[in-house]
Amino acid sequence: MNADVTVKPEKRFTGIPVAQGIAHCAAFIQYTQDEEIIARQISAEELHEEVARFETALVSTRIELLEIQRQIASAIGSKDASIFDAHLLVVEDGTLIDEVLRRLERDKNNIEYVFQEVARKYCQTLESIDDPYLRERVGDIEDVTRRVIRNLLGKAPLNPAAHDQPHIIVAHNLTPSDTAQLDRKLVMGFVTEVGSKTSHTAIMARSLEIPAIVGMQGICQEIQLGDDILIDGYNGLLILNPTHETLAEYGRLEQAKEAVTERLHLIRETASTTSDGRHIILSANIDLPEELDDIAENGAEGIGLFRTEFLYLNRVQPPDEEEQFSHYRRAAERSLPHSVIIRTLDIGGDKTNLSLESSQEDNPFLGCRAIRFCLEHVDIFKTQLRAILRAAVIGNVRIMYPMISGIEELRRANAILEECKSELSGAGVPFNPQVEVGIMVETPSAVMVADHLAREVKFFSIGTNDLIQYAVAVDRLNDRIAHLYNPTHPAILRMIKLTVDAGRAHGVWTGVCGEMASDIVLTPLLIGLGVEELSATSTLVPRVKKAVQSLNASKCESLVARVLEMDDASQILIASTAMAREQYADLID
Ligand code: PEP
Ligand code: MG
């Protein structure tokens, strides 16, 4: 770090903490939101100057793109580098440039504004044409527009390939696809301007143990490429130019947290049984195949949710049966002697793959997502089901359908599963015909007909992330209404209870695999509600285990009897936190 950096004043910014941990290194600004350019009238004399600025920005952008192309070609090969050919064509596009110059002369606005307007029009026209190749060009134009505008504004270039040193990403937004591609060796943490605790990006940060903060509005404007920053994923703080005192304080905090982690590590072989002897199955959620190695290390009893959609992101063709079979087989082997619950493809919502989904929807979380997509794309669904059925020969594999909203969907999915069994049987391929089938309960309609559904499944797993968003009508990604996204809303507790009771009446067990299962402040409520399995983010399993072991199930039941009478979510949270703090304050504070 150079001396100049240390004399800069320390500055603190606050956001929503979504993944614990501390990281300290240089900032890297990535995928910033489009700069909002304000129109400014210019005089006729200024016209020449604006044209000159535009030409310089185009040249700088071209140099920047050629440099990225050179770096990618030497790092991963010229084939991948050629994707930047299309970007280069945009900066050389005569029609686009002529139109900008014509509008500049006609409207006499600042060049950034004129360029942005013309580029937007171009994109809108291309978007409206029913041609996948042209629609793809929209992304190229948007990317190049951003670069040209940043050059016009004199801001640092966006150049991910240039960054081969450890860094913290500061971005407007990161999609789950972006996050799946992060280089874990170099990305020490990330901060975004938008986002929420239950977005899949946040969920992945926790799985990958990357400290992360979201909802830090305007941060991209405050931080420059290479700035010295520290992020505190416990408290949602970004500290620009941390002083020596701050660094020392964080050094002590890290030591204290490490001591807790070491203590938790010691209980990994022990059972997750409450102090009065109720065993709660404690399994892990898996997003990416590489997390499979962590299950035993974290002391989980198998996998309660394998989010298979991550196998389908960032690629044009879905994975074939053999590729999926090898992932599922590995998951089954790693979970032994316990089970793995493989959730069938839950694409849609914030996990998008535009080459699989034919169109973008206005309300993707309410659209053709999860089981709906699979029932529309039976070939894709069958490929996955066959791979699961085959992997079930090796270990203890269960199938779980996401986003079931009624019995018809369950029956259709099961009918397709039976077809897959006949096909495998006809082809003489070994498979396990006895695979247990369960569903995610994550729509209010599924809760209300849980008694019907329970007759045709072996288990329920409550997806509280979605159940809360659908029950309270609050978009799980929208930080503006994050205060309404409330796991202790009385309606949610009642829904969990309805599901558990309906399941019990039919001999069906109920687990929770949404983020509530990883939140140790809520563990007293879930145990008290009669939930039999908790599937938590793999890295948080040791904490949840300690919480379960510290709690008394009968006392949790009394707590639930009390809170079910309450009408106020915050009072319920206070009551549950009080019990949690009484038993394991060291894990909470
Ligand atoms: C849920 O909705 O709670 C869940 C576990 O599924 P996902 O977060 O993948 O939508
Ligand atoms: Mg869900």
Image (spheres, helix red, strand yellow):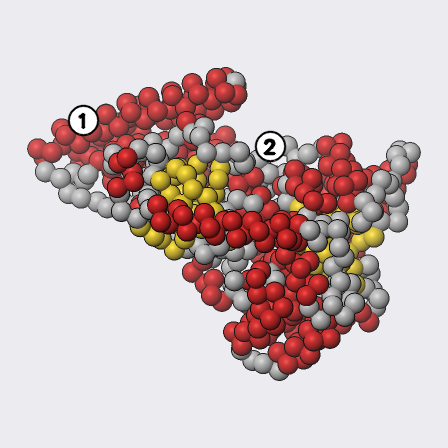
Q: Mark 2 falls on what kind of element?
A: loop
Per the rendering, the mark at residue 316 is 2
Percent x, y of residue 95: 31, 26
Front one among 582 and 459: 582
Which mark is first along the chain, 1 or 2? 1
Spatial distance from mark 2 to mark 1, Cα to Cα?
41 Å
Relative to residue 127, is residue 97 depicted above or below? above
Percent x, y of residue 296: 73, 45
- The residue under the point 43% across, 49% down is 250
Per the rendering, the mark at residue 535 is none
Q: Mark 1 falls on what kind of element?
A: helix
Amino acid residing under circle 2: Val
User: Position of 280 compared to 6: left or right?
Assistant: right
- The residue under the point 66% across, 76% down is 560
Q: Quadrant of the N terminus?
A: top left
- The residue under the point 39% across, 37% down is 26
Specify whether tag 2 is near ligand 1 (CB below 8 Å): no
Q: Residues within 10 Å of mark 1 (few under 14, many from 20)?
A: few
Relative to residue 110, is residue 350 depicted above or below? below
Amino acid residing under circle 1: Ala
- The residue under the point 45% across, 47% down is 251
Front one among 448 and 202: 202
Residue 42 visible in image: yes
Relative to residue 109, is residue 579 depicted above or below? below
User: Position of 326 compared to 582: left or right?
Assistant: right
User: Position of 201 compared to 283: left or right?
Assistant: left
User: Position of 290 compared to 350: left or right?
Assistant: right
Percent x, y of residue 3: 28, 35
Percent x, y of residue 419: 84, 44
Residue 488 visible in image: no
Query: Which residue corresponds to mark 1?
Result: 52
